Image: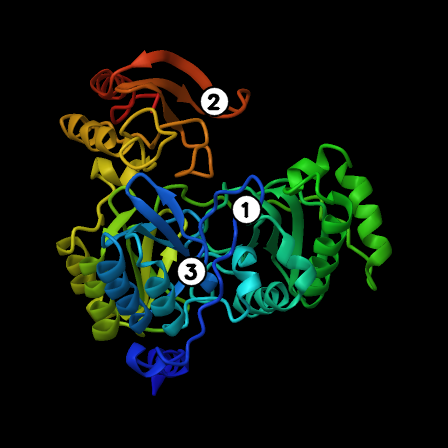
Amino acid sequence: MGFAGSVAASLLLVKPLRDLATTVEIPAPRPEKPGSACPGLLRIVPALDGGICRVKLAGGVLSSQQARAIAEAAERCASGVLELTNRSNLQIRGVLPGQQSELIERLLAAGLGPSNPAADDVRNLLLSPAAGLDPHALLDTRPLAAALLELLKTTPALHGLSAKFALQMDGGEALAMLEHPHDIWLSALPGTPARLAFGLAGCPGDPPLGVVDAEQAEQLVEHLLGLFIELAGNEHSRMRQLLSVIPAHQLLQQLQARLPFSVQTVPADWQRTPVNPRAPMGIYPQQQADLCMVAASARLGRINAAQLRALAALAEQHGDVSLRLTPWQGLLLPNIPEQSADQMLHALAELGLLTDVQEPLSNLIACTGSAACAKGLADSKADARRLAERLRASTARPQVHLSACPRSCAAAHTAPFTLLASSAGHYQLYQRTPEAPGFGQLLASAMTIDEAGDWFAAHCATGNSDA
């Protein structure tokens, strides 16, 4: 059957909606947790453009059949607009009044919801989109990720975690987001037996707290989550908040007292191999012979239902009938025969996806903005498109995050440059520096988008030391 065929055969085959509609039981909508406005599959949150429904994907993986189900549901029950998130999930925007129940029913029938409704909020575990495929990987993180998701799903005490509380697993892949802080992170170390460094409220590459054998990682996370819930109580919802009152070394001491094994010391010479911080686009090799991965980005993080349906067809025609969403708000098609890779990349470009790093939009991130968010001070997506137009006239290709308010919803990491809206049409310009917290050093307090474009053209042109 071959590798791609065996993967396809092992995917969950979802029955058509008409066969399941009479048996799917729709849980009562989950209420928002205090202080949380996070959407979920069972909690549709209102916005200016309609409801938002977030579909959490295990490992960011979506079967072609599930992709078709989402496309149809988005067209029938919502605006047809889909967002790819920075945690490798997918959001349906513009959910119509009175259509929430049908939308949820369709998604559950496609196998996209939690088997335990109480666990929907806590299924937050980020992997590399190339997990199990990347030739640079030190460890295939997928089996451990599956075990941790099962732990989150089946442990009632963990269902009270914040909808923002999240875990990250890094197997040493070259295609990895290493600048998105998570409450708990694990990163593979070279050598045998397989070991994982772990840390709190940070990213792979930050100083780890300790090291465990890979076979001990599930127990480590289980006890660490239990300790967090016990110590955090109702006062702290995120690990960084707990660490502000209990130093990390004290937390480690309490954790060690619970563990049936000893946490190992971090090797003095350990350092995570750096990766390219830009969104992956193009053709990438796989571990598996004669196969490759093809990656593209969505324009400002959005696609529509017709594009998703076409992507499903491409995955069936050339791949293993699966899609992988990426934390750069893009997607990756795995297990593509090498002889089909160029054809696949061309097809993605024809669909309107970004496949060329020289396209300015491929380096821009923008939140929903005032067109759909009540907190937005500017129409950041429209302004990002205008900025891209200005940049096409120059050789400047800066990585820029446009945020319509300080919450920074579209980018969980700090971009090299940030344009933070101060009013409609005006932005503060920040540049990331090691010394400055938050968005970085303030360079200008009020810029129009055209002025920002001129500044980038002057300071970030090819060969300029400021780029």
Which residue type carries mark 1? Lys
Mark sitting on residue 164: 1
Quadrant of the frame with the C terminus: top left
Between disc 2 and disc 3, whose residue precedes?
3
Query: Depth-wise, is mark 2 or mark 1 nearer the camera?
Result: 1
Which quadrant holds residue 41? Answer: bottom left
Q: Nearer the viewer, residue 187 or 290?
A: 187
**x and y percentages locating residue 6 in the rendered image:** 38, 83
Q: What is the secondary structure assignment of the residue under circle 2?
A: loop
Relative to 163, say whether 394 is above or below: above
Which quadrant holds residue 359? Answer: top left
- The number of numbered badges drawn on the structure is 3
Q: What is the secondary structure assignment of the residue under circle 3?
A: helix
User: What whole-number distance in Å separates the C-alpha atoms at marks 2 and 3?
Assistant: 30 Å
Mark sitting on residue 76: none
Residue pointed to by mark 3 = 60
Residue pointed to by mark 2 = 440
Query: Depth-wise, is mark 3 or mark 1 nearer the camera?
Result: 1
Query: Depth-wise, is mark 2 or mark 3 nearer the camera?
Result: 3
